Amino acid sequence: MLARSYAHALNQLLSTLPAYEGDRIIRSFLGVLARRGHRALLPRIVRELSRIHTSGSSNKPVVLVPRGSERETLQSRIDAICSQLAIEPTTLAWQEDDRVVGGFLIRTKHAQYDATYRRALITLYQKLAS
């Protein structure tokens, strides 16, 4: 979670400042990690930055599906959700993600629709626990 926070903060900072400031920002960021004793998080921060740049931060909506899933089986459900979110289904970028076990996840710049099995299991657990 901390690595994700660092990655989002760094991404936001780098996207708002001019490109020539990038070197200075990275050096300062590495200094902050060292002072706080969080240098071991660096590989996870880089991985999260990569995820941000490939899926979440772009203007193009992304649908994350399990590896090896059949697109046709999910297409009708995804089309229905896209109409609710006012997204054109043809603009979706499809990505296979090992963290998605079943179902799908749609991410846009400002919204996320989670129809994964994980979300369903969490909801079921919360209902049983209360």
Image (cartoon, helix red, strand yellow):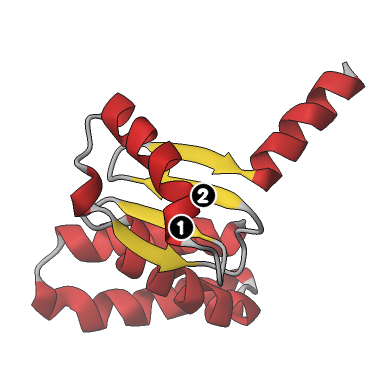
Q: Where is residue 7, by image quadrant?
A: bottom left
Closer to us: 85 or 31: 85
Q: Position of residue 96 (x, y in %)?
A: 48, 68
Query: Where the C terminus falls, by quadrant?
Result: top right
Residue at 38% over, 33% down: 81
Closer to us: 79 or 24: 79
Query: Where the N terminus falls, by quadrant?
Result: bottom right
Q: Which residue is at the far front?
A: 72
- Specify the amino acid type for callout 1: Leu
Q: Where is residue 12, by image quadrant?
A: bottom left
Q: Position of residue 91 (x, y in %)?
A: 19, 52
Q: Quickly name the residue at label 2.
A: 104
- Specify the amino acid type for callout 2: Phe
| Mark 1 burial class by Cα count in 10 Å: few <14, some 14-19, many 20+ | many
Q: Secondary structure under badge 1?
A: strand
Q: Is residue 104 above or below residue 69?
A: above
Q: Is residue 118 visible?
A: yes
In the drawing, what numbered circle is on residue 10? none
Q: Which residue is at the far right?
A: 129
Of mark 1 and mark 2, the one earlier in the sequence is 1
Closer to us: 7 or 33: 7
Question: Circles 1 and 2: CB distance less than 8 Å?
Answer: yes
Residue at 36% over, 31% down: 80
Q: Position of residue 113 (x, y in %)?
A: 45, 37
Q: Is residue 52 visible?
A: no
What is the C-alpha distance between the residues marked 1 and 2? Answer: 6 Å
Closer to us: 92 or 25: 92
In the drawing, what numbered circle is on residue 64? 1
Q: Where is residue 99, by image quadrant?
A: bottom right
